[in-house]
Amino acid sequence: MVQRPHVRAAAQQSHLQTECASAVAARVSPVSDVASFPGTILEYIHDLIDGRNFFDPYGADAMWMRALFAIGAIQIYFREEKPSEAVSLIHDLRGVVRDLNEFAFDDARIRSFFEESIRYLGTDTAADTLDRTAGEDEELSASVQCIPTMMSKETLRYYKWLARTLREPGDIVELGSWMGSSTACLAEGLSHNPHREHTRIHAYDSFIWCDWMRTYTEAPELLAANICAGDSFLHYFRGYTAPFRHLIDVHQSVLKTTAEQTALAALEWSGGPIAILVMDFAHDWATNEAMWRVFSPSFQSDCTIVVFNQFGNIPAGEVREFCRDKALELVPLHKPHSSAKAFRYRKAVV
């Protein structure tokens, strides 16, 4: 990065961080349709084009834009995990960190996010062994596609394929079923698997509505119902998954952590062998550790497949670190073109 002394000096003034943050907040909005952009960002671009304003490629706005693009690049990388793209991504992220240093920007969360991403990418050596084609040709039925979901079709295809091709002994555990789209895909795949007629799917969720869930659905019946925070949506789950109810055992419970405060029952497991576990409860370390404590005693070495559905999401740094901490027991296996990543469990040699 070419450095301009007058910009660097201005950036080090105590009020710059606040000004940069407010400017970006006013100009950038998390929307996918350019027609929905706030007038401020469109006016800003028009002013640049018409010469009424000047865009300084070494200034604060440019630094923020590079940071945003870098976050987007991280998300794209973790959808595919192509080893050939890791080196250039690390180079770009180091450039963002240099920008933060140049502008004396001291936000600990932002700096930590980029530095941890660089450390992870710099030591990730398993991407070459991943199967990226698993489930990509699977077809989703119309009934499954009608279920409200937070998942991509690539993930849903993978889940259907995973259950359809399952050969190992044990049941399927899904942690975080929401309205049941992934549950239905697992059940549909299982129903087409002639070798697994006695396998059960154990669907765990609080089935309690939170306000943030409204952001992730356009289903008319859910929006019209105006479900309130704290209400149970279990009856919706049962309705959406009704064609497969003979395959599904429903558990309204939660994983208890030290931070967990709820009246719902603590999640328990009977101790039977597990063939597949899908983890989609949360992306914090404590919840994943609680999952491991409850279920890993029933994992079968070189047989059980553990899928972390949130692995590639931007906030899921603790999930990735958790998997790295369990590297002797979690062998990378499948990488659908989505946030999900699957591992084969292998009992660690003590």
Image (tube, grey):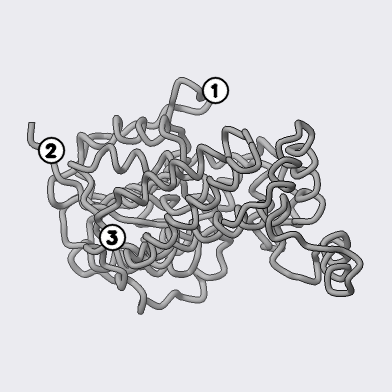
Q: Are marks 3 and 2 in contact (CB under 8 Å)?
A: no
Residue 147 image label? none
Q: In the figure, is residue 162 to the left or right of 107?
A: left
Q: How far apart are marks 3 and 1 (CA)?
A: 38 Å
Q: Where is residue 73 in the image (x, y as percent from the top left)?
A: 51, 61
Foreground label between 3 and 2: 3
The residue type indicated by label 3 comes to Ala
Q: Which residue lies furthest to the front in this view?
A: 5
Whether 212 is drawn above or below 138: the answer is above
Q: Distance between the residues labelled 1 and 2?
A: 33 Å
Image quadrant in which the N terminus is located: bottom right
The residue type indicated by label 2 comes to Ala
Residue 261 image label? 1
Which tag, 3 or 1, sits closer to the chain's start? 3
Q: Crowding at label 3, few (<14), some or many (≥20) Cα neighbours within 10 Å?
A: some
Q: Residue at x 18, y 41 (%)?
A: 328
> Is disc 3 placed on a helix, strand or loop?
helix
The quadrant where residue 338 appears: bottom left
The residue type indicated by label 1 comes to Gln
Q: Position of residue 198 (x, y in %)?
A: 22, 56
Q: Which residue lies furthest to the right in this view?
A: 52
> Is disc 2 placed on a helix, strand or loop?
loop
Q: Name the residue under label 2.
A: 348
Which tag, 1 or 2, sits closer to the chain's start? 1
Which tag, 3 or 2, sits closer to the chain's start? 3
